Amino acid sequence: QVQLVESGGGLVQPGGSLRLSCAASGSIFRTYNMGWYRQAPGKQRELVARETGGSTTNYADSVKGRFTISRDNAKNTVYLQMKSLKPEETAVYYCNAERVGGTLVLGHYWGQGTQVTVSS
């Protein structure tokens, strides 16, 4: 298993930027797909961005062009750079790691979540 520790959340004004970080306890090189999800009060958790170990990425349509997911394998850390933030994007943001082996999904792991509040 892997432990995920998130940081970087907080209060930001509309139109501002934040970078979230998710540090993994072990190597995520090639064997983990990494993703960011968010959940607003009263709503379902949704996928925001995802990156495979092969660096294939996908994003929710609502964040394309504004959010960027990346990873630093040397630091075992994944990032979510968020720009031009909107008030409706206030949510708890969660880091997710999906361990894969060939075509098999071996496990899912979640961070504790970090609050992002977009408000003036």
Image (spheres, rainbow, N blue to C red):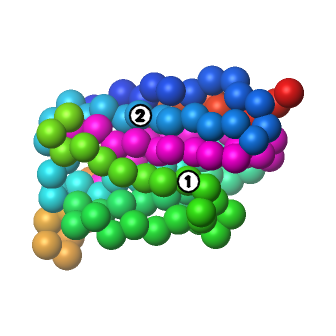
Vertical placement of 52 versus 13: above or below? below
Q: Are marks 1 and 2 in contact (CB under 8 Å)?
A: no
Q: Of the residues shown, which amino acid type is indicated by label 1?
A: Phe
Which residues fall within the magenta stretch? 76-98
Placement of the C terminus among the 4 image quadrants:
top right
Q: Residue at x 74, y 50 (%)?
A: 43
Q: Residue at x 69, y 24 (%)?
A: 11
Residue 75 visible somewhere in the drawing: yes
Placement of the N terminus among the 4 image quadrants:
top left
Residue 62's spot in the image, x, y percent?
Answer: 68, 63
| Of the image marks 1 and 2, the number of the one nearer the N terminus | 2
Vertical placement of 91 versus 105: above or below? above
Q: Residue at x 15, y 51 (%)?
A: 29
Mark 2: give few (<14), some (14-19) or many (20+) Cα within 10 Å. many
The residue that disc 2 covers is 21
**Residue 67: image tag:** 1
Mark 1: give few (<14), some (14-19) or many (20+) Cα within 10 Å. many
- Say whether residue 97 is magenta: yes
Vertical placement of 30 versus 28: above or below? below
Q: Quadrant of residue 31?
A: bottom left
> Distance from label 1 to label 2 (Cα)?
13 Å
Q: Relative to 59, is 106 on the left or the right? A: left
Question: Which type of secondary structure does the marked residue at label 1 adopt?
Answer: strand
Residue 72's spot in the image, x, y percent?
Answer: 25, 43
- Residue extending furthest right? 120
Q: Of the residues shown, which amino acid type is indicated by label 2?
A: Ser
